[in-house]
């Protein structure tokens, strides 16, 4: 059976303010960025929920990328999840101005039957209870990865602890890794998170790149040094999408595969931040991604 | 004529508090860390000033590393520069608790005649006026690099602007690069600093590594992921010392040489932070440095 990648997460309208402009109600959400990013490598399956206000144009965009939206349900009478945020001058920190979960507040996905044979599973950031329920519905996954955040670490700690041993890989950002492990050193934190269950752990450091902790040791990758940071929204999910999309498409032997996947994730995310929303990803191609990957490899060689 | 490396900067007693202990009046200062770090690669020449309270034991330590202290003068009746600082829980930020410049406040070095033929020059962090005066005394330097800081950018802007075109390379940290160029993006900032005169610019990002901007483009190097960060004091000067020490010892063709030098600087700095003061550097060897460099190279490969 061929590999198949499923993502379960949010589809949202993002309104974003930055020191250099903004955008209103752009298509966003974790499952959107993840699936779009992974579509350069595979044909992802998207599971999410939207309201009746979700325009056909967005569904067509997913279709144009061969993203299977059979699992994107529309809640009658509901409104799509909306988020509004403002980035600070340095573009590394932001304030959330408004959150309207709307239909996402009761998101409790039942996977389409034809999605249950997925080999690669990404549980985008969400309650660990929902993440576990999604995982229960996958028959025989070969690679399960999840994202989490400080909210769940603080408020659903026990449920998260139960989920972690079921994961192959966990994504989390640097401050979350410190919070979860009560360490103050990131390398110790990454190693400590592995002891909680995941076979490998990827700590995301924004513009500073990411660090992988696995049985093969530590792998570090800096961010791609782009000089056009227009909107960092979706960078983390694009990184995960590029990474898992690549893994789904490559049956080569580990561990080189996971490292290449980290590099692809980094490159896809570097395109994401170069425009608002999906703007820059819409204008790129697998060929341009591969070219930037080669430039990046040269940029790191010594 | 063989290459020779000179450093002009501070020699100090550092008192350091961290969440995991501290140290009183440890030998420190920019010229100390730089010369010790570079001594794994070459025989550096040190120029600085200390007070009558400077113990013989420290001079012997320099001598044991073949550091030429002909330029380390003792000011009669004076006290050595003292600094006291406290690191925060994350070890990335610190508060300065006390600064007593003492003999360093009137530091205006006259170089020993035999140092004036130095080929490689490091102007450690200090007033750009003093840095320029030092440079005036070098007959025919082949590589001049300097470090600077926010204080000089703000208070001696014009003098710094006059110095920059005389430099081959400038070190500065990320926030200082943004301050100097009024950019908010680090890649744009690095490129903008080059336009102010230095042939190449190295932006230091602490645990996140460093970025080089040169005519060959951008080169990025992450920090070595050490899990033992005991005391970050001196990491930047150790990085510069390892880097310039290596450059002084390698006559290979550019640009690979500068990249290798960045890697060596990163590795030497990774040892520095693993203990207070010079503690860890004193216990390492060129062989151990080379071994960690190879581990690091593998850690970055994809």
Image (tube, coloured by chain):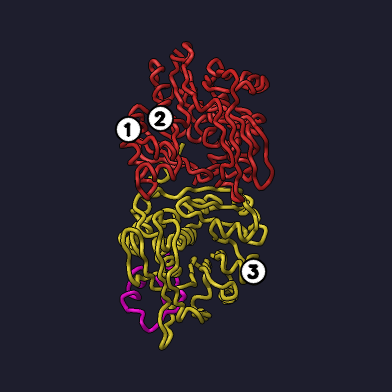
Chain colours: A yellow, B red
Of marks 1 and 3, the one in the foreground = 1
Residue A121, x across and y down, in percent: 53, 68
Residue A119, x across and y down, in percent: 53, 67
Residue drawn at 63 percent across, 34 percent down = B277
Label 2 resides on the chain identified as: B
Q: Are marks 1 and 3 in contact (CB under 8 Å)?
A: no
Residue B287, x across and y down, in percent: 61, 28
* Secondary element at tag 1: loop
Q: Residue A161 or B123: which is nearer the viewer?
A: B123
Judge whether residue A46 is colored magenta. yes
Q: Residue B240 or B255: which is nearer the viewer?
A: B240
* Label 3 Cα neighbours within 10 Å, binned few <14 / some 14-19 / many ≥20: some
Find the distance from the CA under tag 2 to the CA under tag 3. 53 Å
Residue that label 3 marks: A157
Q: Which mark is residue B197?
A: 1
Label 1 resides on the chain identified as: B
* Secondary element at tag 3: helix
Q: Residue furthest bottom?
A: A77
**Above or below for B61 versus B207:** above
- Residue B158 lies left or right of residue B250; in this view the side is left
């Amino acid at each position: 059976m061929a590999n198949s990648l499923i993502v379960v997460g949010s589809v949202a309208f993002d309104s974003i303010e930055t020191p250099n402009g903004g955008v209103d109600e752009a298509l966003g959400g974790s499952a959107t960025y993840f699936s779009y990013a992974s579509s350069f490598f595979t044909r992802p399956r998207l599971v999410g929920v939207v309201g009746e206000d979700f325009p056909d144009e967005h569904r067509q965009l997913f279709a144009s990328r061969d993203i299977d939206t059979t699992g994107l349900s529309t809640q009658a009478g509901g409104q799509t999840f909306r988020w509004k945020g403002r980035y600070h001058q340095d573009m590394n920190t932001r304030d959330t101005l408004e959150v309207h979960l709307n239909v996402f507040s009761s998101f409790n996905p039942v996977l389409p039957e034809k999605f249950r044979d997925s080999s690669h599973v990404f549980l985008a950031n969400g309650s660990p209870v929902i993440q576990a329920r999604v995982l229960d519905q996958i028959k025989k996954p070969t690679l399960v990865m999840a994202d989490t955040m400080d909210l769940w670490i603080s408020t659903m700690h026990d449920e998260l602890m139960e989920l972690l041993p079921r994961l192959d890989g966990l994504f989390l950002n640097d401050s979350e890794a410190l919070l979860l492990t009560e360490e103050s050193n990131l390398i110790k934190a990454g190693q400590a998170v592995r002891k909680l269950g995941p076979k490998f752990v990827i700590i995301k450091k924004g513009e500073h790149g990411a660090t992988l902790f696995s049985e093969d040791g530590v792998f570090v990758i800096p961010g791609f040094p782009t000089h056009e940071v227009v909107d960092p929204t979706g960078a983390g999910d694009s990184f995960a999408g590029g990474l898992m999309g690549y893994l789904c498409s490559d049956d080569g032997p580990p561990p080189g595969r996971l490292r290449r996947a980290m590099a692809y994730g980094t490159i896809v995310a570097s395109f994401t931040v170069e425009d608002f929303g999906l703007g820059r990803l819409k204008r790129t191609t697998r060929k341009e991604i591969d070219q930037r990957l080669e430039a990046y490899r040269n940029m790191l060689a010594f």
